[in-house]
Image (cartoon, rainbow, N blue to C red):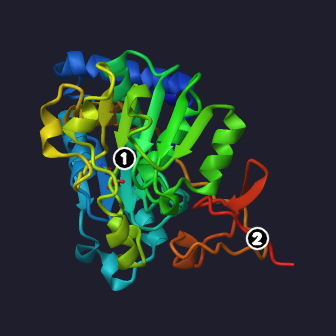
């Protein structure tokens, strides 16, 4: 089977779901359904192709999902899951690591704890680069996974009531998913988080500008009977600088069988995984719990994405324009460590933000 790369030509680096047009999403999803129904038709689509897999941060699901996806398409994988085993441990810059690996591979997937690192890396990659999660910022292939799961389980995305619950401040899957859902019609959002862990301001601005109805609440009980999709997330321990604060907030939301009794019969429970204690094990036996299937859909939609990107021609990266004196204040932004990067600014709904990590900037007088 041959992939429809021509129609995909505008799509190259996938830093966020916004790098994919809605036509491309529909095409990717359709191709994903074809893969699910006839995987054997796709088992040689990437034969001779190599994926570079750069995991600077621990991952089980996403790493294995990408590797399994490439191997099921007949391709091979090179790379590392532990930066200590690469030249990064010798002090190599992101730019050099990415320039090197893009000499050897036909596409790259990269995960890093550093926010904006995927955008930065894509500027130096001659092959398509997929963001497999950059710190607490974005995670577009989890979004593809989530949208695929909703389509498979509910048959549509438009018009749904969707609740997201947990660490909405640091959960990159939540940020990417909200941004994507704003491009569908009439989604009603219920954002369930403690005051300390609500969505970042740029996501709130986006929700306001999109005209979608959204409710920010602190309790799950009052909303559970109103929703079609419940997206649970864990409190992101590794993003806390103060462990006392983490200890105070962990375990704040626990979905149990008692709560599930109040939910709609056709509601689905999703979770990007790994789960800590926010969903009781007993909920796994409820047919509405779809989080393990969700992980499987993730592999199929990644197969669809890899199929389409790994055949694109090599091209030089495009640098962001050099900025002036504006410095990003986010201590986790890639510009803090990779000093050679052009300082660049973009506008999110009238607010000046770092072009890498989306953090709001305040210009120096
Ligand atoms: C998520 C992630 O890494 O952001 N997991 C994943 O990709 N499957 C969610 C999480 O770590 O909580």
Asked if residue 227 can be seen in this view, the reply is no
> Residue 343 has which mark?
none
Quarter residue 325 falls in? bottom right
Which label's residue is closer to the chain start, 1 or 2? 1
Residue 167 vertical placement versus 266 (above, below) = below
Q: What x and y, as percent, mark residue 183?
A: 59, 30
- Residue pictured at 12% horizontal, 32% vertical: 285
Quick one: 140 or 167, which is closer to the camera?
Answer: 167
Q: Spatial distance from mark 1 to mark 2, Cα to Cα?
A: 39 Å
- Residue pictured at 37% horizontal, 26% vertical: 150
| Mark nearer the viewer, 1 or 2 | 2
The C terminus lies in quadrant? bottom right
Which residue position holds label 1?
Answer: 106
**CB of mark 2 near ligand 1 (< 8 Å):** no
Q: What x and y, as percent, mark residue 336?
A: 56, 78
Which residue position holds label 2?
Answer: 362
The N terminus lies in quadrant? top left
Callout 1: SS: loop
Quick one: 102 or 224, which is closer to the camera?
Answer: 224
Quarter residue 81 falls in? bottom left
Q: What x and y, as percent, mark residue 164?
A: 43, 42
Among all residues in the image, which is located at the extreme right? 365
Callout 2: SS: loop
- 10 Å crowding of disc 1: few (<14), some (14-19), many (20+): many
């Amino acid at each position: 089977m041959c992939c429809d790369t021509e129609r995909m030509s505008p799509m190259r680096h996938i830093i966020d779901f916004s790098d994919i047009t809605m036509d491309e999403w529909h095409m990717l999803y359709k191709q994903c359904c074809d893969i699910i129904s006839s995987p054997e038709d796709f088992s040689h689509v990437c034969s001779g192709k190599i994926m570079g897999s750069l995991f600077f941060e621990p991952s089980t699901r996403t790493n294995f999902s990408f590797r399994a996806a490439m191997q099921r398409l007949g391709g091979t994988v090179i790379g590392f899951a532990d930066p200590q085993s690469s030249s990064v441990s010798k002090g190599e810059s992101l730019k050099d690591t990415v320039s090197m690996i893009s000499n050897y591979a036909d596409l790259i997937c990269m995960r890093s704890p550093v926010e904006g690192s995927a955008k930065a890396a894509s500027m130096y990659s001659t092959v398509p680069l997929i963001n497999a999660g950059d710190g607490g910022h974005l995670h577009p292939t989890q979004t593809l996974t989530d949208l695929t799961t909703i389509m498979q389980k509910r048959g549509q995305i438009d018009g749904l009531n969707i609740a997201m619950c947990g660490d909405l401040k640091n959960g990159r899957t939540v940020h990417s998913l909200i941004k994507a859902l704003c491009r569908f019609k009439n989604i009603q959002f219920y954002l369930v988080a403690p005051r300390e862990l609500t969505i970042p301001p740029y996501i709130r601005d986006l929700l306001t500008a999109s005209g979608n109805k959204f409710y920010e609440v602190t309790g799950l009980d009052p909303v559970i009977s109103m929703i079609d999709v419940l997206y649970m997330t864990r409190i992101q321990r590794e993003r806390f600088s103060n462990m006392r604060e983490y200890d105070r907030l962990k375990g704040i939301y626990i979905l149990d069988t008692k709560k599930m009794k109040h939910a709609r019969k056709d509601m689905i429970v999703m979770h990007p995984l790994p789960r800590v204690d926010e969903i009781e094990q007993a909920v796994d036996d409820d047919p509405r719990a779809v989080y393990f299937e969700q992980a499987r859909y993730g592999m199929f939609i990644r197969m669809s994405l890899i199929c389409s990107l790994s055949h694109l021609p090599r091209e030089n990266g495009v640098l962001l324009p050099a900025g002036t004196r504006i410095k990003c204040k986010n201590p986790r932004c890639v510009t803090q460590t990779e000093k050679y990067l052009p300082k660049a600014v973009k506008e999110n709904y009238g607010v000046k933000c770092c072009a890498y990590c989306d953090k709001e900037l305040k210009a120096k007088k």
